[in-house]
Structure formats: structure tokens, C-alpha cells
Image (cartoon, rainbow, N blue to C red):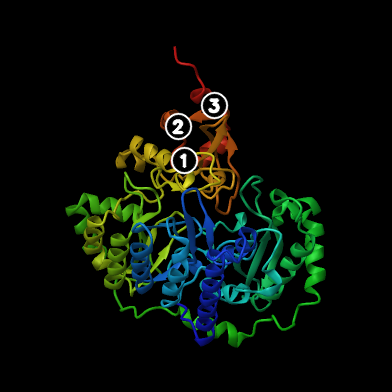
Amino acid sequence: MYVYDSFDQKVVDERVAQFREQTERYLDGQLADDEFLPLRLQNGLYIQRHAPMLRIAVPYGLLSSKQLRKLAELTETYDKGYGHFTTRQNVQFNWPALEDVPDILAGLADVQMHAIQTSGNCIRNTTTDQFAGVLRDEIADPRPWCELIRQWSTLHPEFAFLPRKFKIAVNGSTNSDRAAVRFHDIGLELVRNDAGELGFKVFVGGGLGRTPLVGQEVRDFLPGIHLLSYLEAILRVYNLLGRRDNKYKARIKILVKALGVEAFRDKVEAEWAHLKDGPATLTEAEIARVAEHFVDPAYENLADADAILAQQKADHPGFAQWLDRNVYLHKKPGYAAVTLSIKKLGYAPGDCTADQMRSVAHLADQFSFGELRVSHEQNLILADVRQDQLLELWEAAKLVGFATANIGTLTDVICCPGGDYCALANAKSIPIAESIQAQFDDLDYLYDLGDLDLNISGCMNACGHHHIGNIGILGVDKKGEEFYQVSLGGDSGQNARVGKILGPSFNAEDIPAVVDKVIQVYTENRQPEEAFVDTVERLGLDPFKERVYAKSH
């Protein structure tokens, strides 16, 4: 895990002091609202429906147990005793008082955390696979590259006021994409060329929101040493040509679409010609320096505990279900990666109380070398658990409500805070998630359905990533009333595609039944071992429309 050096700490500490003075001036009436707006956004502070919201950066989703305990302490002291883990692997406090925010930032700085560039028209938190560095299907660990991007992009003066917010993701897996790189402004996929050299396939122009688009490939192989200079070339083209007259057309995806990918690529290559082999070129020594922060922990030499686990599964059926859904094969024999589900029925997806944070921090210390990760699905991961301790972990996780065996199922809902919190939302999201979870609160039935993503957003900004859910639900406003639009067939992986809208929207009370009817069509028509998204692709929308919109007699 990356540890700040003296320079990192000085930058964060000075940023806290600067914002404290700015906040005091605003509260004293020396700064107008429009003057304070860009200053608070640079420090992750929004004004939501009921109160300010502070978004805290969790770089590439990696947290220490010490940092999680600090988050628990801060939310108890300055908020309502819980935080919200987001689809961008960050943490949000939804109820802080404005005058307390500098103190929160100072507390974060004590444990090498901050809220810099979690909002505003800048390069946001770089994200990656929550299992980076531990699973067997990885070509290389993406975390060092994420850290290099973080250091390069943080407070970069040239890219502090882009036409719109900008997001980068990195994927290291050879046969899957758990980072959804094709739906980012820049998506980077680690690859090796014919000579065995490590580099990147580069995608540009992906994104969700009002105009969901799949990113397009602009380079099939970029040598690793040229990563930062090539990113700089892309961002310079965007900064120069991206629209600033209309925020709905300001994202780089609109520029790529307007120019065409070939013309956009030509402009990037022309700009890169001035930057290639220049000061931003990475040296092997610098790459190695950063990579040293992501070495394996002190694994023991263990054999896979197959016999022990087989007996424990026979003795504990609930444990067997949990192993099948929440536990993953590790690259190191005798270890496993475990997802702790924050999707227990009756709880808002992604919400985590201070007591739960402390409990998970204790689990991380006891079972996973004091580290944990945040996933895009709003769950928490212990990445390095001994297989012979899995039963003990399961029993401990049950006590805090984090052992629900539903990872990858219909009730592992991805959901934004929606109208309960967000001033931008057209409709509430959390009650819809809870009603669907209640409708399908039968694990055996869920397992029969297989992997199935359901995503809910309260507005077109798509913070719940509804466009790429196998089933997507979008809150819309109809003359002041909340309705919900349903889409089917979205996929965030290597076969990236945007879901197709089923038809007219539904009221909130109808949504569980609508989802149930969609599932009925799937179960009646799927081929053996066929995933939901593949059935939708094969059948098209018509059979689903006929069932959902059929009038009862």
C-alpha cells in the first residue's frame, strides 16, 4: 500500500490550511457563493438536498484498517455515524456542517487521506479492479500504474479546470474487466506485445450520464514508459477542443464522437509527438520505486485447504453458500480473496455505520494484513485471507451483518443515494433497491438465476451506473411525480454495451413486479448455463415487453 513521503504529506497539510482559511472567509461574508463554489469543489464539498456532502478519496479503492477507523471516528464526531461507499470506490459523508469540514480534512490528513479532486472539472480518483494484485487471471498488478497517475494528476496546474470532470480506470485482468474501463473518459487495459513487453491498450470517450457511450480504442499498444506523456496528449487535445459552452456536451466522449475516433487519434498523436521522450517519460527506476509499495504481504507457505473446507461446507450449509458467492481463488496457494457484502436486506446499499467500519477494520487486522478494498459494487474486500480461517471470518462477519451470500446476484444492488440526499436526483433510489431486495429474498432462487447485475440511478447523471446494469433502473420526473425507466442488457465488461430501454416508465410500487416479470421471461427462455445478459441479447426486448406491459384480465 502506498505510504506518503514528506512531500505528499506537506501538500495535503497545506491544502487543509488553505481551505480552512477560505471557509472562514466565506462564513464571515468575505467570499460570495460563486467565489466559494470552485474552492469547495476542489476539496470534495458539495451542497446536497439537505446538507453539505463531503466526498473523500480512496485511491484505487485501497484502505488500511487505520484509515477505516479514522473514517468511523470522523463520521461519529462530525456526521450522523455512518458513511456511504460509492461506485467510484470513494467514501461520502452526507451530513457534515460546513464549519466542520476543515477539521474533517485535518483528521483525514493525519492518516494520509484527503478529498482533493473528488469533485470539480478535474481528473478524479483513478479506479481499478478491487482484486488488483491478488487474483490468478491478472497480467500485471495495475495499482502501481494507478499510483503513478494519481501523483501526476494531483493538482496538475494544466488540468485543474477542464471542460468537465474526467475519469481514468485501469484493468489488469487478462480475461475480464472488473474496472469497466470502456465506460471511462480514458480506459487503460494492461497488455503484453509479441516481445513480452508490458504496456497498455488505450480507450477514450466512454462514459454514462445523458449520453452513454462505449469508449473507442485509440492505441492497441502503448509502452508503459510513455503512459503519462500519452495521457497528457489526450488531455491537451480535450482541454483545447472540448466544449465549454454547454456542460451537457462538454465531456470528452462528445468530442470523440463529433470528430470521429480516427480524427481524434490523429490529433492526439500529433500532440504526443511534442511530448514523447520528454520530461513526463517514466524511467524504469521510477516505475520500480512506486511498485515497491505494492509488494505481496508476508504470505505463509500454505497448501490449499481443500479437505478442511470440504468438511466445513458439509457441516455449515450457510458457509458453503458464502464460499460459492463471496470467496475467490487467490494467486497464492492457501489464501483467498473475500467480498464482505454491504447489501443486507433493510440497509441502503453502500451505507456503513461507524461501528461496522470498526468491526471491518478489526477483521482486516485479524485476517488480511490490515488492508481492505472498496469495490465498484459498493462492497468491501479482504484480499488476503488464509483458507483455513475462512470459517472463522464468516462467523465474525455474520455478527456485523456483512456475510450475506449474495455477491453477483440480483440483490447485490448497485445504487446511488438518490432523492433521499442528492439535490440533482429526480427520484429516490434507496427505497427501490430495498423493495427489490425484499421481493427476491430467497437465496436458493437467486443462485438459480446466476450472475445478474441490477443498477439504480436517481437521475441521468448515472451515479448508480444504470446504463450498464444487466437490469438498469432510472428515476425520472413526470409532472412532479417519481417514475422509473427500466433498461435491459447492459454490460460493463469486455463485451461492453449500453442497456436498451424497455418502454414507458413505471411508478415505484410496480417496480418489484416488473423485475419479477423480466426474470420470469429469462428463466422460461434461457439455454443451459446462459447468463441473463446473453439471453437478452439473443431474444431481444420484445418477449420482455410483451410480458411486462401485458394488460391483466
C-alpha distance separating marks 3 and 1: 24 Å
Dot in front, 2 or 3: 2
Describe the element under mark 2 as helix, strand or loop.
helix
C-alpha distance separating marks 1 and 2: 9 Å
Q: Nearer the viewer, residue 524 or 348?
A: 348
Describe the element under mark 3 as helix, strand or loop.
helix
Extreme residue toward the top, this view: 553
Q: Which amino acid does label 2 sit on?
A: Ala
Name the residue beneath numbered marker 2: 508
Judged left or right of residue 145, residue 454 is: left
Q: Is residue 492 visible?
A: yes
Name the residue beneath numbered marker 1: 428
Q: Is the residue under label 3 in contact with that under label 2 (CB below 8 Å)? A: no
Q: Which amino acid does label 3 sit on?
A: Lys
- Residue 291: percent from the left, percent from the top? 52, 80
Q: Earlier in the sequence, mark 2 or mark 3?
A: 2
Q: Nearer the viewer, residue 395 or 539?
A: 395
The tag on residue 545 is: 3
Describe the element under mark 1 as helix, strand or loop.
loop
Q: Is the residue under label 1 in contact with that under label 3 (CB below 8 Å)? A: no
Q: Earlier in the sequence, mark 1 or mark 2?
A: 1
- Residue 186: percent from the left, percent from the top? 65, 62
Residue in the picture at 45% in, 54% down: 377
Q: Can residue 140 be seen in this view?
A: no
Q: Quadrant of residue 266?
A: bottom right
- Residue 150: percent from the left, percent from the top? 57, 73
Judged left or right of residue 268, residue 441 is: left
Disc 1: CA contacts within 10 A as few (<14), some (14-19) or many (>=20): many
Residue in the picture at 21% in, 63% down: 392
Quarter containing the C terminus = top left
Position of 11 relative to 511 (above/below): below
